[in-house]
Amino acid sequence: MMLTTLLRLFFSLALLFSMADPAFAGELNVSAASSLTNAFKDIAQSYQAQYPDAKVQLNFAASGTLLQQLAKGAPVDVLATADQETMDAAEKQGLILVKERKDFVRNSLVLIQPISSTIKIEHIEELQQAAVKRIAIGNPASVPVGRYAQAALQAARVLPRIEGKLINTLNVRQALDYVARDEVEAGFVYASDAALMLDKVKVAAQIKIDKAITYPLAITKDSNNQIEAKRFVQFLASPTAQAIFSKYGFKPL
């Protein structure tokens, strides 16, 4: 009788451990900036092909939104943002492992127009012309590309003259979509985003800013799967991942 009870207990415990937290089976939650969507989807597929035991769950949004989600307790193992400012905020809030923070790619800011547009815009100052009525820009409060664009407009001393034309978007991909659908005359996006829709948008101007646009990532402090997170971060530096980044218009550091 006692032997039967012990056997039942043994099998119950075995079943319990087999149903334990999926993180131990290699599940990884990655939150990444919207501009990384296409690249990270391809990279996740390549990663899972190389490591069949792994399962990557991807979450994309504006960097500021990702930070808010993480701060509110969203399950995140790896955070990848499109700017240093957001990652600095995550660090100050104690949400990431500082020693596991690193930059992994860089990008550039461009001004785009609908492919069929006949409005001539070669310089940021030309956004002041009457023909340009609407300009898509990521909300500077939460979207890094919006902050970069805002800084460029301020540096060119045209921001006060065109503020009424600015259409704030939730993320960089929304700005890209507005231009692609010819709903605005111009928009600010990353070069990598513009490269996705060259059949619908054209680059009007390369926008110079004071600092390089580098993308940082970090393993979160409350990650339940730090071993898998480190393996994924290492994979991002591999030739396979870097080739995918290059394919989508990102530049190496």
Image (spheres, rainbow, N blue to C red):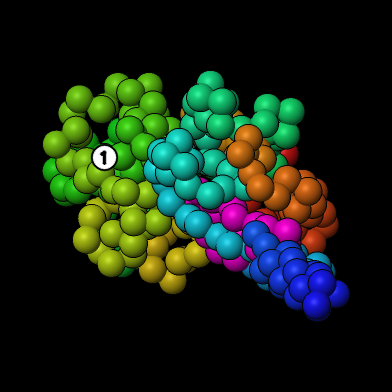
Dominant secondary-structure state across the stretch colored magenta = helix
Residue 133 position in % (x across, y down): 16, 47
Q: Residue at x 31, y 39 (%)?
A: 139
In the rendered image, the quadrant that contains the C terminus is top right
Relative to 95, residue 170 above or below: below
Q: Pick whichever, 134 or 71, lies toward us.
A: 71
Q: Residue at x 67, y 31 (%)?
A: 97
Q: Pick whichever, 185 or 65, lies toward us.
A: 65
Q: Is residue 143 left or right of residue 56?
A: left
Circle 1 sits on which residue? Answer: 127
Relative to 154, residue 113 above or below: below
Relative to 165, residue 93 above or below: above
Q: Amino acid at mark 1?
A: Leu
Q: Residue at x 56, y 48 (%)?
A: 76
Residue 121 seen in the figure: no
| The magenta segment | 22-41
Residue 40 position in % (x across, y down): 61, 60
In the rendered image, the quadrant that contains the N terminus is bottom right
Q: Is residue 67 left or right of residue 106?
A: left
